[in-house]
Image (tube, helix red, strand yellow):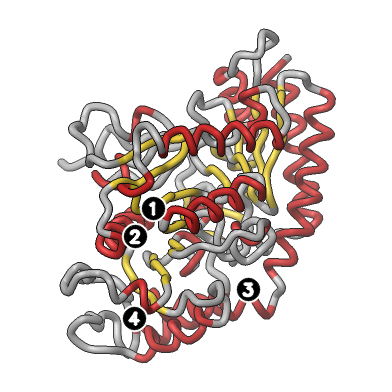
Amino acid sequence: MATLSPLLKQATPVLAERGEGVYLYDTAGRRHLDFTAGIGVTNTGHCHPRVVEAAQKQVGTLIHGQYTTVMHEPLLRLVDALGEVLPDGLDSLFFLNSGSEAVEASIRLARHATGRQNIVVFHGSFHGRTMGAAALTTAGTKFRAGIGPLMPGAAIAPFPQAYRYGWDEEEATRFALRELDYLLVTASPASDTAAFVVEPVLGEGGYIPAPPGFLEGLRERADRHGILLIMDEVQTGFGRTGRFWGHEHSAARPDVLITAKGLASGFPLSAIAAPTALMEKARPGSQGGTYGGNAVACAAALATLQVIADEDLVGNAARQGARLNDGLRKVAADHPEIGDVRGLGLMQASEFTAPDGEPDAAAAARAHKAATDHGLLLLTCGAYGNVVRMIPPLIVTEAQIDDALGLWARAVAEAVA
């Protein structure tokens, strides 16, 4: 008899039978308000009719057209459609299956293009679990412990975590950029540094938005030293933050952009985008894969883009995200156990802190469980597990936001009683 690996720990006890919009239904018929969205994947909601229709139609015509063997129309149409939403100049795309694969492809490209070895990442980063990506991941030791030696050439600089340092964003940004400059003259010489890899909002690291000045400071230093700026938009992309791309909250623009998760509404698909002149510097044979650019996933991604545009889901993420943030702050005002509320768009978090200022993972866990018991599905994150995050689908309505806030207020009250 086979079983799932015992290391696969579920965040909730729900046995999902079907999904519809913002809701999951379990095998007992109970409805759950899903504010996890498959960890930021189902941006168009569960089983959006237009995504379902596109996938079903594609399954009946071509499921797998391996794209280094033959070409297929869904892939070509998706390249054109992404060209309409990608930052200017990022006109060349390479498709893969997962975020980790895309991160590794971006590292390979950066090293080929620059002839340099080192990659600088930032404290709290999450870039994946595969060996190269794990070397760039600092959101928690569980992602990198016991598997060394890790890929060489990874250097880690501070991220401007204002709440953690007890500073405002401006001071935290000054500190982080100053320490980055110090790293470039001590541990990772600028002449040996291929790329900065950064999330516009730390994901697993605690849902901490990068201040615009920090991203702009990275861009300035990248230009000054001939370093590539890689934006990991796996979780922040496709409207999640209230802009189509998370980095658009700043004036900084990437040399390479990584996308996955919300790209295909639940079908495995990821990509890196770069200028053609940069992509051409990758060595022949360094890009490929069996399933990348799968025809069904591409059809779903095309439908996803159309739904996002037609239903103004980016605008809805901004509006409902502001409503959610405001409501979370009101809950926090009644409960000093919540030390910070933060986020962009529909990527919001509440951080639980003990009276002495230390992270309170136990309180976060109790609030998370109480919310689940009341039918609100959430996730925790942060290095200490003391942050509860909300990631609803971008189709969420005012009424559903208010419903979630009511359930959250009850859960927090029970957790800290």
Q: Residues within 10 Å of mark 3 (few under 14, many from 20)?
A: many
Q: Looking at the image, tell me whether mark 4 or mark 3 is earlier in sequence order.
A: 4
Q: Nearer the viewer, residue 403 or 201?
A: 201
Distance between the alpha carbons at the discs numbered 1 and 4: 32 Å
Nearer the viewer's eye, disc 2 or disc 1?
1
Residue 295's disc is 4
Q: Nearer the viewer, residue 291 or 93?
A: 93
Q: Mark 3 is on which residue type?
A: Ile
Quadrant where the image shows the N terminus:
top left
Q: Mark 1 is on which residue type?
A: Ala
Residue 195's disc is 1
Q: Looking at the image, tell me whether mark 1 or mark 4 is earlier in sequence order.
A: 1
Q: Looking at the image, tell me whether mark 2 or mark 1 is earlier in sequence order.
A: 2
Secondary element at image label 1:
strand
Q: Looking at the image, tell me whether mark 4 or mark 2 is earlier in sequence order.
A: 2
Nearer the viewer's eye, disc 1 or disc 3?
1
Q: Mark 2 is on which residue type?
A: Ser
Distance between the alpha carbons at the discs numbered 2 and 1: 9 Å
Nearer the viewer's eye, disc 1 or disc 4?
1
Q: Which residue is identified by label 3?
A: 308
CB within 8 Å, label 2 to label 1: yes
Secondary element at image label 2:
helix
Is residue 208 visible to us here? yes
Q: Position of residue 397 (x, y in %)?
A: 76, 59
Distance between the alpha carbons at the discs numbered 2 and 3: 26 Å
Is residue 380 visible to us here? no
Nearer the viewer's eye, disc 4 or disc 2?
2
